[in-house]
Image (cartoon, rainbow, N blue to C red):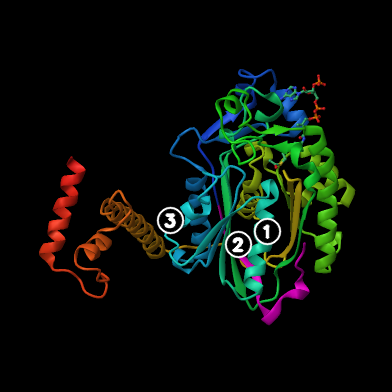
Amino acid sequence: MSLDAGMMPFGRYAHIVGWGKAIPDRVVTNDELAQIVDTSDEWIRTRTGIRQRHIAVDPNETTATLGAKAARAALDTANLPSSKVDMIICATSSPEHTFPATACIIQDLIGATNAGAFDLSAACSGFVYGLGMAKGLIASGQADNVLVIGAETLSRIVDWSDRNTCVLFGDGAGAVVVQASAVPGGILSTEMGCDGSGADVLILPAGGSKMPATLETVASGQHFVKMNGRAVFRFATRVMTDATRKVLDRAGLRVEDVDLVIPHQANERIIASSMRQLGLSEDKVFMNLQHYGNTSTASIPIALTEAIEQDRIKPHDKIVMVGFGAGLTWAGAAIEWGVPTERETSFWQTSQRTAAYNLARARSQLLRISRRLESSLVSEDGASLAERMSKRFGGRKPEEDAPPAEAEQELLEERSGEEEA
Ligand code: ACO
């Protein structure tokens, strides 16, 4: 599936105007891992390029809180209040729950009261799929501001006794604000692909509806990531190259036009091999996997944020983001960078935003309390207070004719008596 530059109606272009990341504090080095599984720093470094990863050890640090932190950072750089966000897309392979979507929890945490929100499940390709969705929403006029987030706490679904997988992954989140603009450029073209015949190559087998959680599934470790590393390796090098060529083609660009590739940060050897096939030199490829490991959907937006922090991106640069993951999926995007990367935020703007987030927290608490109160006024047979009163007072519809205040009080007392009993 693809959307290319030529399909932009009404002169609406989709630009990345905000970016940010959130990384847990705790660093776990390869040497530390060598104390819990049969591996070594040397093996991990030479086979993957990874030297350390960050792990969310605080149980209060979750996929949603990391995602919300990255989202706030992205809104800050975009200088955009959360109330202006139209859609939140959270790409994740480690959602907080099967439902509700982690994106909904993030919506509440950042007070994006006018936004729709949904999770996107395309594994490590998810963030770039999210860019494709954002571009489509903007091009069709359905949204002006879309938050695309990649957020993960993979450490919670990885088997820490399986050396084939536990050395690879890390936790973190990255986010961007994609905004409608009349200025040509931004996300020029995308490629989103899938080969479901490889679904079992990288899988979390249990916990879904096919294999619901049972004592046996837990005992046999079916709730942890299972991977055929070699099969993923072969697939990855092929699709990274193909997807890059496709998005460049669709954007009318050549490999020589590319200023920077930001690939999914899974394995140094996969990146080197695919970039070699494309004829792209090392200085045109951004890599930070040595610090974070594979953070799945978060790896590309974290890398983008760091590339900007390191002055690797400037307006009019041609950038390719390309990834692969479970599914098996792949995705690419060619981007013409459209905005200055140096941002100054005034004290006043920062204070305003902090106040808005505090207000969002208070609003959320109030809504929770009022919802709790509301359900405490619902009787066991499911009838609400209003329905019971309507029955008692002769079948009137409560909204038509409200019963007297004393009667309401009487019913409330009756209800509290029932509860005490
Ligand atoms: N330490 C030491 N030895 C190890 C370790 C380890 N951590 N892991 C595996 N080995 C062993 C294997 O058991 C094997 O031993 P054997 O020959 O006795 O059987 C040996 O090392 C070589 O194994 P290979 O699989 O051939 O190693 P390879 O060079 O392919 O590297 C790796 C393995 C790093 C997993 C590589 O295949 C890879 O990166 N694949 C892609 C994985 C990936 O990117 N997954 C994420 C996808 S994105 C997403 O959707 C989440």
Give the Cα separation between the discs numbered 3 and 1.
32 Å
Residue bearing the label numbered 2? 341
Could you tell me which residue is drawn at 61 percent across and 25 percent down? Answer: 160
Give the Cα separation between the discs numbered 1 and 2.
7 Å
In front here: 92 or 369? 369
Residue bearing the label numbered 1? 313
Kind of residue at badge 3: Asp
Q: Residue furthest front?
A: 394
Q: Point out which mark residue 108 bears.
A: 3
Residue 151 placement, left or right of 43:
left
For the record, the magenta segment spans 1-20
Residue 3 placement, left or right of 19:
right
Q: Earlier in the sequence, mark 3 or mark 1?
A: 3
Q: Quadrant of the N terminus?
A: bottom right
Q: Is residue 312 visible?
A: no
In front here: 201 or 75? 201
